[in-house]
Image (cartoon, rainbow, N blue to C red):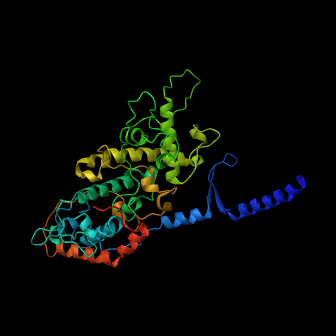
Amino acid sequence: MNLLWRPALALGGVLLAAGTVATYHKTTTFQHGYPGVGMAIVETNERLADKVKANELPPALPPASAEGVLAVNAYKNVQVLGHISSGDFTRTMTAITLWVSPQQGCGYCHAPQRDAQGKVVVNEDGYPQADLAKMDSDELYAKVVARRMIQMTQHVNADWKQHVQATGVTCWTCHRGNNVPKNIWFDEAPDPGDTRAVGYKGGQNTPALTNGLSTLPTSFFRPFLAGEESIRVQSGEALPSGNRQSIKQAEWTYGLMTHMSNALGVNCTYCHNSRSWADWSQSPATRATAWYGIRMVRDLNNAYLEPLLATYPPHRLGPTGDAPKANCTTCHQGAYKPLLGKSMLTAYPVFAEPKPQPPKTADLPVDLGQQAGATALAAAAADAGATTLAAAAGGDGGAVP
C-alpha cells in the first residue's frame, strides 16, 4: 500500500509546488529604517502599479494673467481669494469645478437657473444649470462649504508644514472628482444592546474597514481625531505607577493604529522600531510626522468641519446628526504620502497660504464682471475635459447634491 501512495504523494507535491509558483506575485521591498528589525515595506508589483494609477495628478490648467482687476472688484460677494486677479480667480474656480463636481459643473455650488414657472433648468445630463446672473448668491450650502474648505486648505499648507511639508494639499487631494470625499467618518449610532446585561459587544466584534476587519472597536475616531484622549497606553515605569489607561483605551489605540496603517498602505514599522515600540529615540522620523498628522486632523475637525453642522442639509449628516469629518484615509487613500508625494501647489500657489482680503473699491457691471467671468468659467471647464476627469476619478463624479 505504501508503494502505491508514494507516487501519488510525489505528484501531489509537484502540483502544489507548481501552483505556488503560478500564484507567486513579484514584490518590491523598501528598507526605510534600521536593518534587522523588520523596518521594511513589502509590496507586490501589481499593487504598486495600482497605487501609481490611483494617485495620478489631473492636468494643470494653463496659468492665468496676474494682471488686471482684482477678483474682489470683478465679482460680487467674493469673501476669499479677492486678492488675486479676475483671470486667476476664474482659473481657480474652474479647477475646483473639475476636482469636486466634474459632471454637475458650476451648478453644484451656484444658484440654479429657473424658467418662467420657477422650475430649475437642467442640462442634457439632468444637472441644474447655474444662473449666471446669480453667481454671487449663497443659497446653496455647497458654496458656503466650498468657501470654508478653501480656507481650510490654505490653513493646512501654511500652518501644518510639520505634517504636509512643502508638498501641501489641494481640493483634489481629498475629493478626486467626487462631490464628497470617499473617506469621511461620522459618529456611530448607539448599539441597541448597550443596556443588555449579557451580549453587550462594547463596540467590538464588528469587522469594518476602519478597524482592518478585526474585532477591535470601531468607535475610536471621536476620542482621538476629534477629542484629545491620550493615545499612549504603555507605562514608562514598573507597576504600580499611576498609569490608569484601561484595556478599552488600549483597544482604541490599536484600532487607530490599524486605521493609520491601512490609510497609508504601510505596516507598523513604518513609524515604530519593533525592538522598542515606545522609544522615540529609536523610531524613524515618520513617527513624528504621524504625531503632527493626528493633531492636524483634530484641528481640522474641530475648527473647520464640525462647525459646518448647521450649514449641511439633513442628508449630509451622519446617523446621530453630526457633520462629516476627516481621518487619515481622507487624504492618504492607501498611499504613504497623498498622491505619492507629488505637489500641486506649484501649479496652484493660491492654496499655499491665506492672504488678506483687500477692500472692495469698485463695482463692475454684471455683464463685464460676473456674467463674463462665469461664461468663461463654463467654457474653460468644458475645454478641460470634465467628463474625462470624472471617469479617471471613479466614473460617476461622486455623490449627487
Taking the view exactly as shown, the residue that stands out farthest to the front is 1
The answer to whether residue 122 is left or right of residue 167 is: left
Residue 393 point in image, percent of width and height: 42, 67
For residue 35, above or below residue 96: above
Q: Residue at x 27, y 78 (%)?
A: 379
For residue 353, above or below residue 114: above
Residue 62 in view: no
Total labels drawn: 0
The answer to whether residue 306 is left or right of residue 31 is: left
Taking the view exactly as shown, the residue that stands out farthest to the right is 3
Residue 120 point in image, percent of width and height: 17, 68
For residue 267, above or below residue 29: above
Taking the view exactly as shown, the residue that stands out farthest to the left is 116
Viewer-proximal residue, 65 or 399? 399
**Residue 148 found in image quarter:** bottom left
**Residue 15 found in image quarter:** bottom right
Query: Where is the C terminus found, in terms of image quarters?
Result: bottom left
Q: Residue at x 51, y 30 (%)?
A: 247
Taking the view exactly as shown, the residue that stands out farthest to the top is 240
Residue 360 point in image, percent of width and height: 16, 62
Viewer-proximal residue, 205 or 116? 205
The answer to whether residue 323 is left or right of residue 53 is: left
For residue 30, above or below residue 276: below
Residue 131 in view: yes
The answer to whether residue 58 is left or right of residue 83 is: right
Residue 350 point in image, percent of width and height: 33, 63
